[in-house]
Structure formats: C-alpha cells, structure tokens
C-alpha cells in the first residue's frame, strides 16, 4: 500500500532512520553495526548508513563513544521533549494562567529567535510582542530571565485558548496521522509506518497540552498517543527479535 497520502510526510532517508532509531532508544546510543542492521530493514545499504553516520558526526548531531554513536546534547534535548510530549507531566488546573513578560529593553534578532524557540518548547503562546501565556497545568519549572506571573484573564478562557492555538487544525492532522498508522499496520509496511510515526512525534511536540475544560470534547490527543505507543511497541519488538536492538 505504501506511504499514506498525508501532507507533510518526510521521505525515509538514512539520516532519518538513524536519528529516529536513536531518539527512540534509551539511552540514545547504539553501535554502528546495529544502526546498519536497522537500515537494512528498510532496504538502506550499509555504505549509505555509514556515510550518514559520518555526516551526522561532522554536523554535530552525533558523537562517537567507544565505537558507539550517541546523540549530542542538542538532540538529546529533542529526545527529552519528545518523551515529554508522549507522556506529558500535567497537574490539575485551577484556572490560573502563566504570564511571561519580557522586561529587557533591547534584544538582538538572534536572541529574539532563541527566546521564541524556548517559549514554543514551553508551550506558551504569544499574545503580543514580549507577552506570552498559557494555562498553568504543566508540571515543569519556568526558569526564565523574564517577569513570570500567575493570573486569570478577564475573558472567556475557552475563547482565549481558541485564539492562541489553532485547535481544529491540530486535531484534524492528529486524526489523519492516527488513521495513517492504522493503514500501515494493516498493510504490514514497516517503512511506511516508520515515516508516519516520525510525523506523529513531531505533531505531538506541537500539542499545546491544554487542560480538558479548554479543549473540544472530541480532542484526539490521547488517542494519538495511545496509537503511537502501539506502533512503537511493535517496532521495538521487531528490533529485538530480528536484530537484538532495543
């Protein structure tokens, strides 16, 4: 059946196989022979995998340790974000919102870009230049060089959330990806499932993780996580049974 017809899916490459395999391995470190064997599952030759490994080391994505390849700190941080997206640490929502206000007078374009990336990682949304907020339902610290407040906006929180995040678009794509994993499971196409599963992880990182009262009643976040977990269990079983990896 091949890869499902879902916009934005990225093609399977040697780099994507290596990266996705290490991102799903804890700790994210494997010998070259294991990564070559994983590539073989998808018809990627040993030489192509080894070239990809060399290029990823040169690019700072991987480092070699005692003959193994492991993610550098930057990509280990990505693994942590993906893990948190799969099993988000939340707490009961009291109705409060986190409000982050930038107090610096001047910021360089580079610092603005870096700050926006930090805010996105913390799942805060920008209301206006220098002001960010979200419901205070995530169990994580906000260690930022800014003014951090808790408050309750004087408008309908459901409407506010809907204005900050495109919830229908996220939900629509989540359902497409869920169905895509089902389709690849029925066909038994491991490579296609691998491509869709990588897209699922990227999509989960973009989940705003809002509390239930602010979400539509048919929000598909939990279903997509459960479906991804089933795929990952199957994939890890294949690695263990065929290659002794995982």
Image: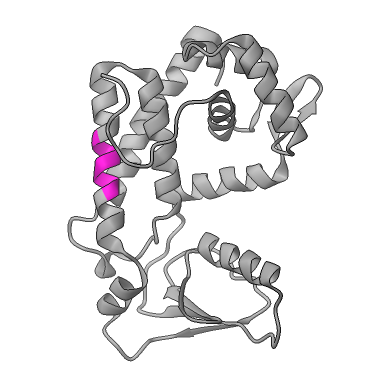
In this rendering, position of residue 163 left or right of residue 88: left
Q: How many marks?
A: 0
**Residue most toward the bottom?**
154
- Rendered position, 76 above or below 211: above
Q: Examine the image and state in which quarter residue 152 appears.
A: bottom left
Most foreground residue, 85 or 96: 85
Picture residue at 59% right of the left edge, 70% below the top: 142
Measuring from the top left, give residue 88's x and y in whole percent. Answer: 44, 53
**Residue most toward the top?**
242
**From the image, which quarter does the C terminus lie in?**
top right
Q: Is residue 176 magenta?
A: yes
Q: Examine the image and state in which quarter residue 51 appears.
A: top right
Picture residue at 18% right of the left edge, 60% below the top: 217
Most foreground residue, 239 or 194: 194
- Rendered position, 239 above or below 166: above
Q: Is residue 87 magenta?
A: no
Q: Which residues are magenta?
A: 173-179
Picture residue at 40% right of the left edge, 48% below the top: 203
Measuring from the top left, give residue 129's x and y in whole percent. Answer: 53, 82
Would residue 86 be visible to someone looking at this image? no
Measuring from the top left, give residue 97's x and y in whole percent. Answer: 42, 79
Most foreground residue, 16 or 161: 16
- Rendered position, 73 above or below 13: below
In this rendering, position of residue 197 left or right of residue 79: left
**Residue most toward the right?**
66
Would residue 115 be visible to someone looking at this image? yes
Measuring from the top left, give residue 61's x and y in whole percent. Answer: 69, 37
- Look at the magenta stretch and give its main secondary structure: helix
């Amino acid at each position: 059946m091949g890869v499902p017809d879902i916009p934005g899916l990225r093609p399977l490459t040697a780099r994507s196989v290596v990266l996705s395999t290490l991102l799903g391995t804890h700790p994210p470190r494997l010998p070259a022979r294991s990564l070559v064997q994983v590539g073989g599952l998808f018809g990627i030759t040993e030489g192509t995998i080894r070239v990809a490994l060399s290029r990823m080391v040169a690019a700072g994505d991987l480092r070699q340790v005692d003959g193994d390849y492991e993610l550098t700190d930057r990509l280990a941080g990505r693994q942590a974000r993906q893990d948190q997206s799969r099993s988000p640490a939340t707490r009961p929502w009291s109705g409060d919102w986190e409000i982050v206000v930038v107090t610096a007078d001047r910021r360089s374009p580079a610092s603005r870009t870096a700050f926006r990336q930090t805010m996105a990682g913390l799942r805060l949304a920008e209301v206006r230049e220098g002001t960010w907020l979200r419901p205070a339902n995530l169990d994580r610290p906000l260690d930022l060089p800014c003014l951090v407040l808790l408050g309750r906006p004087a408008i309908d929180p459901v409407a506010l959330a809907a204005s900050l995040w495109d919830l229908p678009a996220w939900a629509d794509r989540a359902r497409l990806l869920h169905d895509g994993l089902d389709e690849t499971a029925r066909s038994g196409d491991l490579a296609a499932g691998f491509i869709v599963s990588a897209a699922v992880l990227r999509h989960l990182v973009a989940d705003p993780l809002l509390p239930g009262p602010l979400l539509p009643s048919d929000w598909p976040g939990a279903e997509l996580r459960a479906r991804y977990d089933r795929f990952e269990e199957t994939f890890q079983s294949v690695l263990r049974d065929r290659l002794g990896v995982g």
